[in-house]
Image (cartoon, coloured by chain):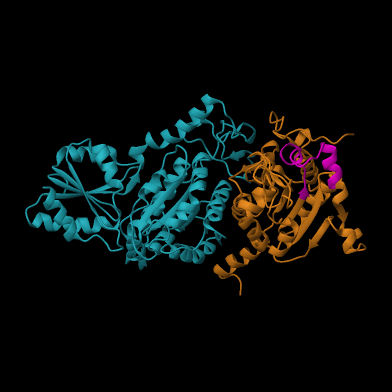
Amino acid sequence: MAYDYEKSIRPGKLPHIWCPGCGHGIVMKGLIRAMDTCNLDRKMTSIVSGIGCASRLPGYLDACTLHTAHGRAAAFATGVKMANPEMTVICCGGDGDGTAIGGNHFIHACRRNIDMTYVIMNNYIYGMTGGQFSPCTPTGHLASTTPYGNPDPVFDISKLAIGAGATYVARTTAFHATQIDKLIAEGIKHKGMAIIEVLDDCPTTYGRRNKFRSVVDMMKRLKDMAVPVQAASKMTAEQLEGKILTGVLYKEDKPEYCEQYQNVIERAQGKAS
Amino acid sequence: MAKKVALLQGNEACAHGAVYAGAKFFAGYPITPSTEVAEVLSVELPKVGGKFIQMEDEIGAMAAVIGASLTGAKAITATSGPGVSLKQELIGYACIAETPCVIINVMRGGPSTGMPTGPGQSDVMQARWGTHGDHAAIAVVPASCQEIYSETVRAFNLAEKYRMPVQVLYDEIVGHMRERVEFPEPGELEVIDRQAPDVSPEDYKPYDATKGQVPPLAAFGSGYKFHVTGLNKAADGFPTTKAELVDAEERRQVDKVMDNAADIEKNEEYMTEDAEVILWAYGSTSRSARYAVNELRSQGVKAGLFRPITLWPFPEKRTLELAEQVKAIVVPEMNLGQMIYEVERVSQGKCKIAGVHRVDGEPLNPGEIMAKVKEVL
């Protein structure tokens, strides 16, 4: 029997705002499957986003959803999680929202290792505002504000997350639809900050400008770029040129923030030595 | 049993007031001259099972406060001028998403970095109009350490009652001054909690105007699933651009404050009954003004003091009544003229109005206030 996504969608909230060919819908379906895999109680699940196309995702899902201000998802989510650590907290949003205006909150949420799952949809562009370059737009590529080619170097979101202290970091692409839910589910189950970067496609404002003739071309590019980490270990630097590693890139067990704060409470109340 | 008393800084009194009001969450970023509020709350909140977090910046602190409040915690942040400037976008978010929270602003000189250790009263208009868009504002301006305690409690009450951000503005002088503070007993001061929904989770709408000007607010994690956004929204919390819905929501959110101004308003008057000149002063400046009233009275000048404790919404009615009664109103402020414009606006030319202004980091002294009174009379 086909998987029933409808039961997780809020009645009357579709159609979504995403353009034909956009990968965000694939990611949303992956998130729905992951939430099911983890058997999440929607009343105890908060999905938090910032601003942008990807950040409209929470509104479609039946849960405690919080659509915040540009870049601030991780900071709002920190308040939600600390006020009630029983909540499962999931952030979602785009690359510009998460790593440009939200870059500071992103790295510090990683540093704290607060127990939340951040699904970051990296489509290399600011889609909602019409295709300006983001910290993830490839150098040399065209955007509405880089008419002569993007002069900026690029953020590697996953490496940034690992460097900042996230304890579960995984990457996949919108092409690898069946891997999305597995990685998100693992992130939800992980106690600590989980970052799942999904390389995504924006045919309307990025693909069009950069001569990707069709959505299929963009998807094919995602497929060709992706190399599973296991396979990459057997490849030469030359073979890995231009490739992007996918799968679980980093995992470790470290004290989680809210649990650490519980120790603070116990010390303050004289219950701990 | 004798009441617990302590020699407290205003900032320390503020933190203890927050705990009395039931605060369970603080997020902030260090900034002079407000830091003692954070420092004391980092000690006191975990004692009552509350949480303290020092965020990466002011914006993140305001975001965390809103997130915690929507998850049911009474939440507070404390900052000073430049910090409030950074928080402004999210103060607007708290307005439109109707999220109760308390923002302490210990005012210093400015603009920009200004005088971090000098007092100022130049954020009073920022408190009203700082964030973008149309919105109402509630701000209180305590003038003593004891009053900082009780007004912090009242700020929480107003935030919870009207489902919105409330600012507590006081200048560095009262923030760092030490005074005897009596700790009220439990039950002695009113503590108000937000109204919870009385409908089933299926029927709950977070902005249901049929429930009154201030619809009940459920907490994330309490069994209610709902959507919160900073976009203009309909009763169910989902974005809308339908003109009539946007208009109705915008107006309700302003009206809930303006229609209840009498409930929110709080002023103090001293020798105003027969006054011919009113000193219209707030915060630490009102203490110099009170001294000036006594001095002027001893010299035969019928002076009185009007001290707003709620600054926003502005005490329009009483200010106009006083303007009709007196020859002049003198407005001393540690800025180059902010509230004086409001006094002029509502006085409708009924009396002379003059300001006394300082922006050099020094308090206004009674002598210069008295000199201005004599000049205008």
Outermost residue on the front side: it is A148
Q: Colour of chain A?
A: orange
Would residue B269 appear left or right of A87 to someone viewing this image? left
Q: Is residue B141 above or below residue A164?
A: above
Range covered by the magenta-colored residues: A198-222
Residue B218 in percent (x, y) is at 57, 41
Q: Is residue B340 above or below residue B243?
A: below
Q: Colour of chain B?
A: cyan
Q: Residue drawn at (52%, 47%), measured in percent from left and top? A: B90
Would residue A10 appear left or right of B294 to someone viewing this image? right
The stretch drawn in magenta includes residue A200: yes
From where the camera sits, is residue B39 visible?
Answer: yes
Residue B92 in percent (x, y) is at 49, 43
Q: Residue drawn at (43%, 55%), measured in percent from left and top? A: B104
Quadrant of residue B226 in the image?
Answer: top right
Q: Residue drawn at (13%, 48%), measured in percent from left and top? A: B376
The residue closer to the viewer here, A266 or A59, is A59
